[in-house]
Image (tube, rainbow, N blue to C red):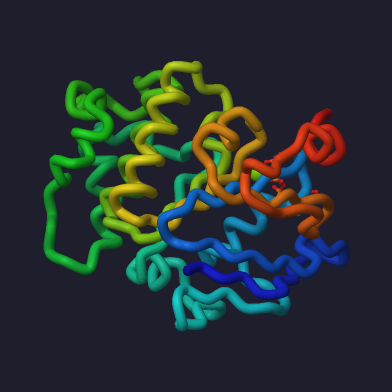
């Protein structure tokens, strides 16, 4: 279980996270929703340790990880698929995946076959440069790179942004497999409501640094969507 307790964060004088509390259990996809600029990426970067909160606590199981550097969090099982993918354009697909291996605690130093089973296109494209892949392929690569570290908690920041529908569906199916068959904790930042309804179990909606609604995705009513998510 990933637990966030009353997290506060500000870039300067304006509070960006203003007391965020969330619970993200294993075997569930927890979706964090909200309009542009409400603090979703800021939250994810605090969870991963790229930003340090002003107050509050982040726990993985019973372990308080609030002060841990990102690398230590990765070793404990957290992995991030960042917004905008951030693959290495001048490294091959296989080399990109190998970067993800660094988070592992075992001695596996080659890309596990299961990554290619989840995303066959990464095998076909193994020697291509990351920068030469399509957007959808790069997104699959970014997820594959995160999975190469054998995480127990997978954080994804808007993975469907700018991706074509058939790849979105494939990503959804992979995440469903990870949740249902590996009991993974998946935390998905997502503005695409249909995807949340189809693949997610729990949701939180953020607005201006606070949680304004939460529940199971069956309760994600059109009223909530209209009030907090529609532009
Ligand atoms: N490095 C930074 N320095 C100062 N302000 C920042 C910085 N990064 C983000 N912000 C501001 O913090 C607020 C929250 O940004 P954040 O990126 O967390 O939002 P978001 O919910 O992820 O938005 P989006 O849906 O567009 O990705 C915004 O007002 C943004 O302008
Ligand atoms: Mg963002």
Splitting the image into 4 quarters, where does residue 170 fall?
top left
Numbered circles on residues, count? 0
Residue 127 shown left or right of residue 14 in the figure:
left
Q: Nearer the viewer, residue 33 or 131?
A: 33
At horizontal 68% and vertical 78% (from top left) the residue drawn is: 56
Residue 73, percent across and down? 42, 69
Q: Position of residue 164 (x, y in %)?
A: 49, 17
112 relative to 138, above or below: below
Locate residue 132: give its quadrant. Answer: top left
The C terminus: image quadrant: top right
- Ligand 2 is in which quadrant of the figure? top right
Drawn side of residue 192 relative to residue 186, left or right? right
Which quarter of the picture shows residue 117? top left
7, above or below 156, in the image: below
Q: Residue furthest front?
A: 218
* Residue lying at 28% horizontally and 55% vertically, measured from the top left: 149
Please state if 115 lies on the left or on the right of 190 as rendered.
left
Give the residue displayed 78% in from the left and 32% down from the top. Answer: 222
> Where does the image place residue 103, in percent across and percent down from the top left?
30, 61
Q: Residue at x 47, y 53 (%)?
A: 28
> At which x and y percent is residue 68?
48, 77
Q: Is residue 196 above or below residue 132?
A: below
């Amino acid at each position: 279980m990933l637990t966030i307790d009353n997290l506060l964060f500000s870039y300067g004088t304006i509070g960006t996270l203003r007391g965020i509390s969330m619970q993200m259990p294993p075997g569930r996809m927890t979706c964090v929703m909200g309009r542009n600029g409400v603090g979703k990426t800021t939250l994810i970067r605090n969870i991963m340790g790229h930003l340090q909160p002003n107050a509050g606590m982040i726990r993985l199981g019973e372990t308080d990880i609030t002060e841990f550097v990102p690398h230590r969090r990765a070793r404990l099982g957290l992995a991030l698929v960042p917004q905008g993918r951030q693959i290495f354009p001048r490294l091959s697909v296989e080399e990109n995946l190998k970067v993800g291996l660094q988070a592992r605690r075992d001695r596996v130093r080659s890309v596990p076959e299961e990554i290619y089973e989840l995303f066959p296109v990464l095998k076909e494209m193994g020697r291509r440069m990351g920068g030469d892949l399509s957007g959808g392929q790069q997104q699959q690569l970014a997820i594959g790179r995160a999975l190469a570290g054998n995480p127990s908690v997978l954080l994804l920041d808007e993975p469907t942004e700018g991706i074509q529908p058939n790849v979105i569906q494939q990503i959804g199916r992979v995440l469903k497999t990870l949740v249902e068959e590996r009991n993974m904790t998946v935390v998905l930042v997502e503005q695409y409501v249909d995807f949340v309804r189809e693949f997610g179990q729990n949701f939180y909606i953020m607005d201006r640094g606070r949680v304004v609604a939460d529940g199971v995705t069956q309760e994600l009513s059109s009223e909530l969507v209209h009030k907090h998510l529609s532009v």
